[in-house]
Image: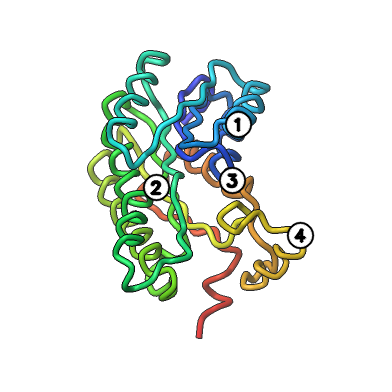
Amino acid sequence: MKTQNKVALITGASKGMGAATAIALAKEGCSVIINYKTDKKSADKVLAKCNIYSKHNIAIKADITNEDDIKKMITQIKKNFSSLHILVNNAGIFDENDNHTNIQVFENIFRNNLLGAFMVTKYALNIMRQGKIINISSIHGRLGYGRPTAIAYAAFKAALENYTKNLAKKLAPQILVNAIAPGRVATSMWDNPTAAEQKKLGSVHLIKRMIQPEEIADAIVFLIKNDAVCAEVLTIDGGYRLANLS
């Protein structure tokens, strides 16, 4: 798929992997829609960087757990661009209170990490005839991984991967759907770690460092440009799985 002059929506794009993806796609000639929930200041900074490389970029405030917000966002995209070619479902959360008994956290993670992607995709498909959908999973979603202190997070990332594969069956060949499962990425989810903290947190990887948001963005661009990959979960974990086999 050629990216020049394509329209791309990236959810949760005010920081981290979403921001890196927005900038990477702008460099590829896409018009980028930067979705954010609350951090307008950061979204505007990402927008300014995107504007260096491409035209007609916009930032839209919308809570991806709120169906009305999503409807309004898609309506605005249709008004500005008429159609959509690329959707990156990146928005998500991690909750330190995640455990096997906390129902409130379980429901919140479900809405942010699974239902939100489902709802955004549902309405995006109204203006999407051909293109690519990329869902952001996690190494926690891979079979047998995760941990009891991230039990809901792991469960819904695993569900997102299953959703990815079944959605791919439904939409191919017009729209190709894939996912990416990162390991530890140096983002706000890890409290924007310092160089020393990154070295420590990255020690669980075979590469002995944390993954950078730009490296995930590069993989997303690859999946968008490659028309032979469909229904796959591309794992970019720095060798985490092999390093932690017991």
Q: Which residue is at a point 54% across and 58% down the rendered structure image?
A: 236
Q: Secondary structure at mark 2?
A: strand
Q: Secondary structure at mark 1?
A: helix
Disc sitting over residue 16 in the figure: 3
Element type at mark 3:
helix
Q: CA distance from mark 4 to mark 2?
A: 31 Å
Judge depth for marks 2 and 1 and give the one in front: 1
Task: Tell me what residue is drawn at x 47 percent, y 32 percent.
Answer: 35
Find the distance from the CA under tag 3 to the CA under tag 4. Answer: 16 Å
Is residue 139 depicted above or below 6 in this figure?
below
Choose mark 1 or mark 4, whichever is in front.
Answer: 1
Q: Residues within 10 Å of mark 1 (few under 14, many from 20)?
A: few
> What's the residue type where badge 2 is placed?
Asn
Q: Position of residue 121 (x, y in %)?
A: 31, 37
Residue 178 tag number: 2
Give the label on residue 66, or none. none
In the drawing, does residue 44 fall left or right of residue 86? right
Q: For mark 4, what is the residue?
A: 195
Q: Residue furthest right?
A: 196
- Return the disc, 4 or 2, that comes first in the chain's sequence: 2
Q: Residue at x 34, y 64 (%)?
A: 155
> Residue flagged by tag 3: what amino acid is it?
Gly
Residue under pointer 1: 41
Kind of residue at disc 1: Lys
Residue 172 in the image, given as x and y percentages of width and height: 29, 39
Which SS class for mark 4? helix
